[in-house]
Image (tube, rainbow, N blue to C red):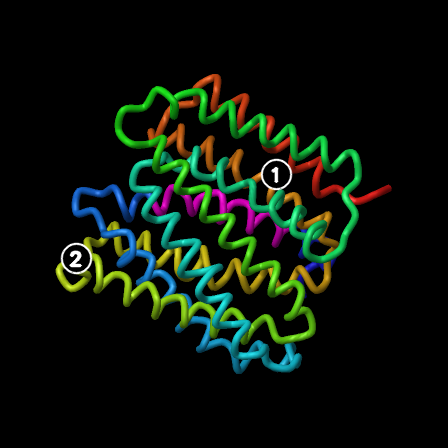
């Protein structure tokens, strides 16, 4: 039996490492020589992840005995958190380097903190307001750096990418408000499968998924994203969310963009410019201020 005191920090470290690497894995799928179309690639990822979740639901439901979520909630979750958010992200990451994408997406916890104030009735403290300003300054620095000088469409793609965490925050806020006492296992399974269905429809409408050349490297990257970057991580995260304080889990928000930036530089997906380094630091500092709990 694993040491209980080491289990939680080990799982949090695993989430940081996997989610920090998924940004580069997406770029592998989209930017190899065969170039998987973005919607087709995202559809394959969530179809596989949804099937994996469906296979393990009977086992997980022995522990998670909460009532099923209402149909409208998992439909919204699938349309926003999975199809909408990741559809936008995959389209944008065709152009935006993985490290920059991770830093821009790191505004998600800030958006959730904002929804807590304006939708869920939480109070905003002065330190949180300061955190919003610091993170916003970090995003401005990132845009004013290499993105502002780019001639390959990276600026427009980066602006588009900001829609991804916004759409995801909308869906997550509804889940937080109306799905707290329902089964997260069923919510994830149903949402992933419905999101995959929407992405498949989008792929056939705008791409030619049946003509995609699924190379070994691209297929392995997609399987990694589906099994490890989606099914395993989301399942682990929701298991931790029921047992660990949200402030402790917020470590993931601090570490993931930094790991993604470092990995992107190591593998040659972008360069660590001064603007990206300063912007990343400011965004992470802002997140720390926003999500920390009152002492």
| Distance in Å between CA atoms under marks 1 and 2 | 36 Å
Question: Residue at point 86% right, 42% down?
Answer: 295
Disc 2 is placed on an element classified as loop
Relative to 121, say whether 128 is above or below: above
Q: Is residue 41 left or right of residue 242?
A: left
Queried whether the magenta region covers residue 180, the answer comes back as no
Quadrant location, the N terminus = bottom right
Task: From the top left corner, tell me how far across and down residue 267 is, in percent.
Answer: 35, 32
Residue farthest along the front direction in this orientation: 118
The magenta segment: 10-26
Question: Are there few (<14), some (14-19), or many (20+) residues within 10 Å of tag 2?
Answer: some
| Pointer 1 or 2: first along the chain | 2
* Picture disc at residue 25: none
Q: Mark 1 points at which residue?
A: 254
Q: Name the residue under label 2.
A: 212
In terms of secondary structure, what is the magenta stretch mainly? helix
Relative to 96, say whether 19 is above or below: below
Task: From the top left corner, tell me how far across and down residue 76 is, in percent.
Answer: 50, 68
Asked where in the image residue 21 lies, by quadrant, the reply is top left
Q: Do the residues labelled 1 and 2 touch (CB within 8 Å)?
A: no
Asked where in the image residue 50 lies, by quadrant, the reply is bottom left
Task: From the top left corner, tell me how far across and down residue 158 is, in percent.
Answer: 39, 36
Relative to 126, say whether 224 is above or below: below
Give the camera-side residue of 14 and 240. Answer: 240
Task: From the top left corner, tell me how far across and down residue 178 is, in percent.
Answer: 65, 70
């Amino acid at each position: 039996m694993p040491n209980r005191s080491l289990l939680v920090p080990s799982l949090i470290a695993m989430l940081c490492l996997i989610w920090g690497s998924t940004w580069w894995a997406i770029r592998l799928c989209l930017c190899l020589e065969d170039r998987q179309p973005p919607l087709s690639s995202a559809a394959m990822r969530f179809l596989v992840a949804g099937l994996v979740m469906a296979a393990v639901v009977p086992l997980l439901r022995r522990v998670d005995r909460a009532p099923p979520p209402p149909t409208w909630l998992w439909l919204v979750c699938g349309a926003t958190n999975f199809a909408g958010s990741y559809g936008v992200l995959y389209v944008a990451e065709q152009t935006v380097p993985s490290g920059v994408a991770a830093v821009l997406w790191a505004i998600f916890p800030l958006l959730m903190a904002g929804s807590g104030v304006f939708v869920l009735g939480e109070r905003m403290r002065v330190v949180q307001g300061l955190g919003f300003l610091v993170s916003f300054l970090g995003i401005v620095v990132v845009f004013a750096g290499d993105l502002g000088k780019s001639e390959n469409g990276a600026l427009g793609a980066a602006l588009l990418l900001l829609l991804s965490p916004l759409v995801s925050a909308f869906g997550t806020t509804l889940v937080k408000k109306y799905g707290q006492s329902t089964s997260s296992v069923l919510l994830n399974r149903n949402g992933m499968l419905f999101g995959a269905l929407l992405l498949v429809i989008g792929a056939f409408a705008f791409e030619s998924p049946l003509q995609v050349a699924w190379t070994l490297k691209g297929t392995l990257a997609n399987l990694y994203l589906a099994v490890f970057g989606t099914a395993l991580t989301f399942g682990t995260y929701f298991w931790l969310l029921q047992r660990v304080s949200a402030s402790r889990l917020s470590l993931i928000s601090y570490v993931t963009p930094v790991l993604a930036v470092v990995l992107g530089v190591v593998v040659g997906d972008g360069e660590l410019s001064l603007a990206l380094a300063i912007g990343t630091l400011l965004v992470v500092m802002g997140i720390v201020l926003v999500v920390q709990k009152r002492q």
